[in-house]
Structures are given as C-alpha cells and as structure tokens.
Image (tube, grey):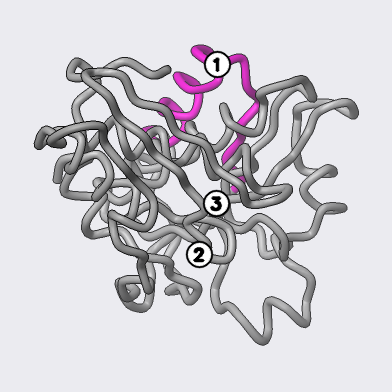
Amino acid sequence: MTLQEAMNARHKVSKYKNKPLSVDVIRKLNDRIEAQNQEYGLNIQLVTESRDAMPGIIAALMSKGVQNYIILAGPDKPGIDEKLGYSSADLMLYAQTLGLNTWWIGGMYSRKNMKKNSNAGDNAKIIGIVVVGYGENQGVPHKSKSASDISSYEGNAPEWFNAGVSAVLLAPTAMNKQAFTIKGKGNKVSMICNNGSYSGADLGIGKYHFELGAGRDNFEWM
C-alpha cells in the first residue's frame, strides 16, 4: 500500500484488538519517527503496551483496547504545532501502510501521563497523541465539506490543485471542522486554518495531505 492509497483507506478508529505490535512493526515505526524528529527537530515518541493514554472514564466510554500511542512533542517555540501536525500526518499514513489503524487525539488524552512518559523534557510542548494498533474495524469516512467550501483558484484550476484539495478533505482535523482556506494562482498555493488552539496542528496535517495529493513538484507554497 502506498501513502496515497493509505490516505484513502485511513479513517478514525477508537476500538482496538488486544494484539501487540510485532518487533518488526515497532522498529519500522520508530525508524519513521526518528526520521521526522531529525528533519524537524522534534521529540515524537512511540509508547507501546501502555493503557494510560486517556483518563479512565473517557477510555471506558469512548475507546477500547488502546495500548499503543505516539506522543506528539517538541520544543515549545513558534511553528511547533504545525511541524508536529505535519509529522503526525506522515506517521498516521505510514502506520496505515503497515496494516495498522490510528486515532489523532488532541483534547481527551491524559496530559499528566503523557508528560510523565515523554522523554522530551520539562519544557517541551505536547499537542496530542496518535493512537496506533490493530482496529476492531477499519472505521468509516467522516462527514466532509466540498472542495468549493475550502478552496478557490484564480482561473481554471489544474488537476494537481484539485487533487491536492481532495486530499486535504481526507485529512483528520480537530472536531472534523476542516477549517481550511486554500487559494491557488499559477503554481503558487496558500493555505490557512482557523480552528482555535488546533489551527497550527491542523494546518500541518492539511499541508502534508495537499502535498501528497498534488505532488510536491507541481507547486510552491506562498
């Protein structure tokens, strides 16, 4: 499965089988995480076989079998939310290519436990977690806006632009708001996101998806 195929196959999954990740899968995830950390100066970390990701009542009501997760952490400085969002999008789709399922959580996780489990240091910023594992199902597509709701192009939009926008509409966002505004002119594209405290993370996720759908060589970010 390619990352493009994974983008279409990936849906939020909140219930997981009691099936541990294999040594090989853990190695591959850690290698991918390390590559993201090195490229963007992050402190993302995989935690396995731990059931402390969420407070007990939330875990009981909204999830099942969550025992592996990725802590999205990095130095607390401008732009870190976007970088973590961008990297988390890559990790989610890569996990899908390995036959895994994921769930991006920005508000319901245990901040206390994540701070305790993270090796990023006391001054690091944690924006959320990505649950990863073998889902009891493959999830279902989320309700989506239309391309015209979030995008515009000056003139006749090329196919790569349309493909990029379609890819953004497949991206996970906080509370599924899809609060993007994407504009194109020639080979220049701009994207903003207005989703409160989640704007930076959602923008990073959206940019990753747009690049994957449009093809990074076809355009430049403004």
Q: Residue furthest front?
A: 155
SS at circle 3 = strand
Nearer the camera: disc 1 or disc 3: 1
Residue 134 versus residue 89: which sits nearer the camera? 89
- Category of crowding for the residue at label 3, using alpha-carbon neighbours closer than 10 angstroms: few (below 14), some (14–19), many (at least 20): many
SS at circle 2 = helix
The CA distance from mark 2 to mark 1 is 26 Å
The reply to whether callout 1 and callout 3 are in contact (CB within 8 Å) is no
The reply to whether callout 2 and callout 1 are in contact (CB within 8 Å) is no
Residue type, mark 2 in image:
Asn
Q: Disc 1 marks which residue?
A: 40
| Residue under the image location 55 percent in, 51 percent down | 130
Nearer the camera: disc 2 or disc 1: 2
Q: Disc 3 marks which residue?
A: 130
Residue type, mark 3 in image:
Val
Placement of 214 over or under 12, stated as above or below: above
* Residue 47 in picture, x, y percent from top left: 61, 46
* Residue 184 in picture, x, y percent from top left: 30, 30
User: Reading the chain from its start, which is encountered first: label 3 or label 2?
Assistant: 3
Residue 133 versus residue 88: which sits nearer the camera? 88
* Residue 104 in picture, x, y percent from top left: 54, 56
Q: Disc 2 marks which residue?
A: 176
Residue type, mark 1 in image:
Tyr
- 204 left or right of 198? left
Quarter of the image for residue 118 reads top right
Q: Which residues are magenta?
A: 28-47
The CA distance from mark 1 to mark 3 is 18 Å
Q: Is residue 143 magenta?
A: no
SS at circle 1 = helix
